Amino acid sequence: QVQLVESGGGLVQAGGSLRLSCAASQNISSINNMGWYRQVPGKQGQLVANITSGGSTNYADSVKGRVRISRDNAKNTVFLQMNSLKPEATAVYYCCAETRDYDMYEPEYWGQGTQVTVAS
């Protein structure tokens, strides 16, 4: 069982930056894949970015160049640095983790979510 706790969300002006953190309850070097989904009411959730235990990263096309995912294995924490934020980035951001395989389509574990609001 992996517990994930997100932090770092909040209100920011368009063009600003935020860094989300996700603290895991176990050694993340043993977790195959970790990432961030975002959810807007009435819309399908979107995988924003993910990072494997080997350090490979993947980004949604809509955020490439403005978002960076990273991990600190010593702190068991994954980060999502978001720059040049746009109002359409407003959503609840969920940290997720997958230990069974590397597929992030339906991650096994989810955090409670953190709200990100980008004001225009």
Image (cartoon, rainbow, N blue to C red):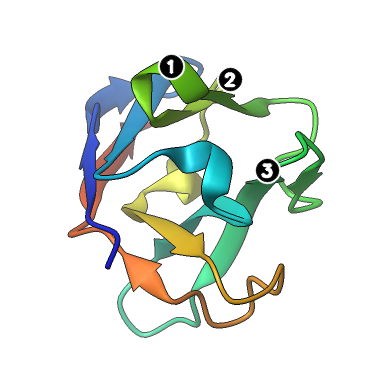
Q: How many neighbours does mark 2 have within 10 angstroms: few (below 14), some (14-19), or many (20 or more)?
A: some
| Residue located beneath label 2 in the image | 84
> Residue at point 44% right, 24% down?
14
| Residue located beneath label 3 in the image | 53
Question: 26 or 6, which is in the foreground?
Answer: 26
Q: Which three-letter amino acid code belongs to the residue tagged 1?
A: Ala
Q: Earlier in the sequence, mark 1 or mark 3?
A: 3
> Residue at point 81% right, 51% down?
61
Q: Earlier in the sequence, mark 2 or mark 3?
A: 3
Q: Viewed as shown, does residue 119 lie left or right of 46?
A: left
Question: 15 or 91, which is in the foreground?
Answer: 91
Q: Which three-letter amino acid code belongs to the residue tagged 3?
A: Ser
Q: Quadrant of the N terminus?
A: bottom left
> Residue at point 41% right, 38% down?
27
- Where does the image place residue 21, in percent across and percent down from the top left? 34, 29
> Residue at point 75% right, 47% down?
59
The quadrant where residue 92 appears: bottom left
Disc 3 element:
loop
Q: Quadrant of the C terminus?
A: top left
- Where does the image place residue 98, in percent across and percent down from the top left? 53, 66
